Amino acid sequence: MKIKVLLVDDEKEFIEALAERLAVRDFYVKTAFNGDEALSKIKEDDFDVVVLDVLMPGKNGIETLREIKSIKPLVNVIMLTGHATVETAIDGMKAGAYDYLMKPTDTNDLVGKIKKAYNIKADHEKRIRNAEINKIIEKRGW
C-alpha cells in the first residue's frame, strides 16, 4: 500500500517537482496550491501525511494546520518553510505539526520524515482498532 501524501504550497513549480520526486519513490501524491484547496482535498481523501508550506497567501500554513488537525486529527503534518523562525516553529508544534523542514528541502530528508510520520499514524490507527475490537469482545462477553 502506498503512503498517501498531500503537498501544499503556493509555489506551483516547486510543488509539482516535489510531487514528481515523491511519485517516483512510490508515494501516492496529490497537490494543493493554497490552504482552502488543501482542506477541501483533506475532506475528500484519506491522506497519511501532509507537507504544508508555512507562508501562503490567504490562509497561512499555521491556520491550515489547525483546521487539518480538527478535521483529521491523526494526519501528521510536516511544515515547510523558507522563512523559519523560532516563533513559527513553536506555533506549528503547538498546533500539532509533526516536524519542520527548511526549503529547499533535501528529498531524502523529506522521504525519511514522511515515512516516520506515516508509521506514527499507522500505529495510532492500529491501537484505536484494537481498542474498538476489545470493546466489542467485552460487550459480547467473549
Image: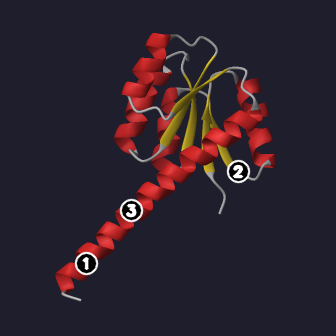
**SS assignment at label 1:** helix
Decide which of tag 2 and tag 1 comes sooner along the chain.
Answer: 2
Measuring from the top left, give residue 48's x and y in whole percent: 54, 49
- Cα gap from disc 3 to disc 2, whole angstroms: 24 Å
- Cα gap from disc 1 to disc 3, whole angstroms: 14 Å
Q: Which residue sits at x=38%, y=44%? A: 73
Disc 1 residue crowd, few under 14, some 14–19, many 20+, Cα 10 Å:
few
Measuring from the top left, give residue 17's x and y in whole percent: 79, 32
- The amino acid type of the residue labelled 3 equals Arg
Please identify, in this view, whether the residue under mark 1 or under mark 3 is nearer the observer. 3
Q: Quadrant of the C terminus?
A: bottom left
Disc 2 residue crowd, few under 14, some 14–19, many 20+, Cα 10 Å:
some
- The amino acid type of the residue labelled 2 equals Phe
- The amino acid type of the residue labelled 1 equals Ile
Q: Quadrant of the N terminus?
A: bottom right
Q: Which residue sits at x=76%, y=47%? A: 23
Residue carrying label 3: 127
Measuring from the top left, give residue 101's x and y in whole percent: 62, 25
Decide which of tag 3 and tag 2 comes sooner along the chain.
Answer: 2
> Quadrant of residue 5 in the image?
top right
Decide which of tag 1 and tag 3 comes sooner along the chain.
Answer: 3
Q: Which residue sits at x=63%, y=53%? A: 3
Please identify, in this view, whether the residue under mark 3 or under mark 2 is nearer the observer. 3
- Cα gap from disc 2 to disc 1, whole angstroms: 34 Å
**SS assignment at label 3:** helix
Q: How many marks?
A: 3
Q: Tell me, yes or no, if residue 112 can be seen here.
A: yes
2 and 1 marks in contact (CB < 8 Å): no
Residue carrying label 1: 136
Indicate which disc residue 27 carries.
Answer: 2
3 and 2 marks in contact (CB < 8 Å): no
130 with respect to 65 (left or right): left
